Amino acid sequence: MEQKFIAAWAASREKAAKLGIRMRPVEADDAMKAAHRALSGNRISDGFNQLADKRRLDLSLEALVVDKRFTGLFSDEEANNALMRLLDAGYRF
């Protein structure tokens, strides 16, 4: 499941780049650590804000975290943080 998540996150970053949104590159072997780190803090990334501005939060890490395919990879706290960020930004499921 981790490999599918890593591939999905990479694909989302590629799609965001095509929209002109610069997302921080993440090496595949560090992707899970990077995802957990990004979800543990209160700081929202610039990429998230840019995706929100373009109404493309579906490409965000947070959207992947709450995706049913990947919820088993994250703690309840991480999933709740992701969900709250999405809801606060006006994301519609």
Image (tube, rainbow, N blue to C red):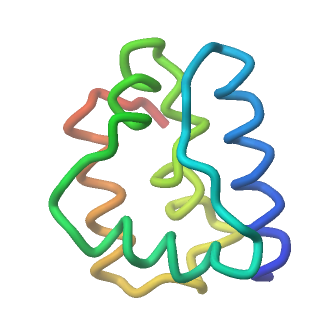
Name which residue lies at 55% across and 22% down: 21
- The foreground one among 36 and 74 is 36
Whether 66 is drawn above or below 49: the answer is below
Residue lying farthest left?
42
Residue 70 appears left or right of 14: left
Name which residue lies at 46% across and 25% down: 51
Residue 6 appears left or right of 26: right
Q: Could you tell me residue 59's position as x and y percent?
A: 60, 37
Q: Could you tell me residue 19's position as x and y percent?
A: 65, 14
- The foreground one among 86 and 9 is 9
Q: Could you tell me residue 49's position as x and y percent?
A: 33, 29
Quarter in which the N terminus is drawn: bottom right
Residue 5 appears left or right of 32: right
Whether 17 is drawn above or below 11: the answer is above
Q: Could you tell me residue 39's position as x and y percent?
A: 35, 68
Name which residue lies at 27% across and 64% down: 81
Name which residue lies at 28% across and 80% down: 77
Q: Quadrant of residue 18?
A: top right
Q: Quadrant of residue 80?
A: bottom left
